[in-house]
Structure formats: structure tokens, C-alpha cells
Amino acid sequence: MADTYYLVTASAVVEEQVAFDLPALCRASGADAAQLQALVEEGLLHPTGRGPIDWQFSGEALARTRKVLRLAHELDLGLHGAAVVLALLAEIERLRSRSP
């Protein structure tokens, strides 16, 4: 008898107008504050505010954070490598949207 494997994924719809402060984004994404600060330093997240205490992240930041952390983990990349992969994926999507 063949083994059957199931992949279960979880997703959440978050409106762009939703704002997260640093602790809320940590809870929602499963990242710790140091990881999120590194994502900001790498240019992958663009919060408003002067520093970590005042930062506010858009709803899109949650999906982006999860994607970056997943890429870094699954492909055994650092954050810089994950940033390169995200840029390449965005470029592929842009090129596909231009094709007739």
C-alpha cells in the first residue's frame, strides 16, 4: 500500500489597512524582534516610525515576513539570500504580467 502524505497550510487574510507594531508583528508572524529588525535593516520591511518602539508595519508586512522566513528556512539562506530570491520572484511576476 502506498504511503499518503498531506501538506497542511494555514493562511490568513490581512487587509492592507491593518497596522502592526513590533510585538504584534512578532506574534502574528512567529518571528522574534531581532529577526524583524534584521528584515528592516536588510530593506525587506519598511515600517513607519523612528525606531523599533515606534515602528508600525502595514498588513502586507505580515505576508512578506512569513515568506522571507520560509524562504530562508526552506532554502537554507540567510536574510540577504532570501531578499535576492524575493527580488527575483517579483521580477518574474512583473515579466509574466507584461506578456500577452
Image: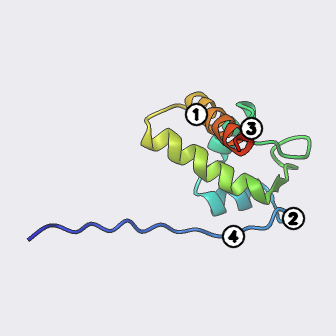
Density class for disc 4 (Cα within 10 Å; few <14, some 14-19, many ≥20) is: few
Mark 2–mark 1 Cα distance, whole angstroms, equals 26 Å
Residue type pointed to by label 4: Val
Apparent side of residue 59 relative to residue 87 in the rendered image (left or right) = right
Q: Amino acid at mark 2?
A: Gln
Splitting the image into 4 quarters, where does residue 15 fall?
A: bottom right
Residue 40's disc number: 3
On residue 85, which mark appears?
1
* Quarter of the C terminus within the rendering: top right
Numbered mark located on residue 17 in the image: 2
User: Disc 4 marks which residue?
Assistant: 13
**53 displayed left or right of 91:** right
At mark 1, the secondary structure is helix
What amino acid is found at the position of numbered circle 3 in the picture?
Answer: Val
Determine the residue positioned at 67% across, 49% down.
64
**Sequence-wise first label, 1 or 3:** 3
Q: Residue at point 66% right, 33% down?
A: 87
Q: CA distance from mark 4 to mark 2?
A: 12 Å
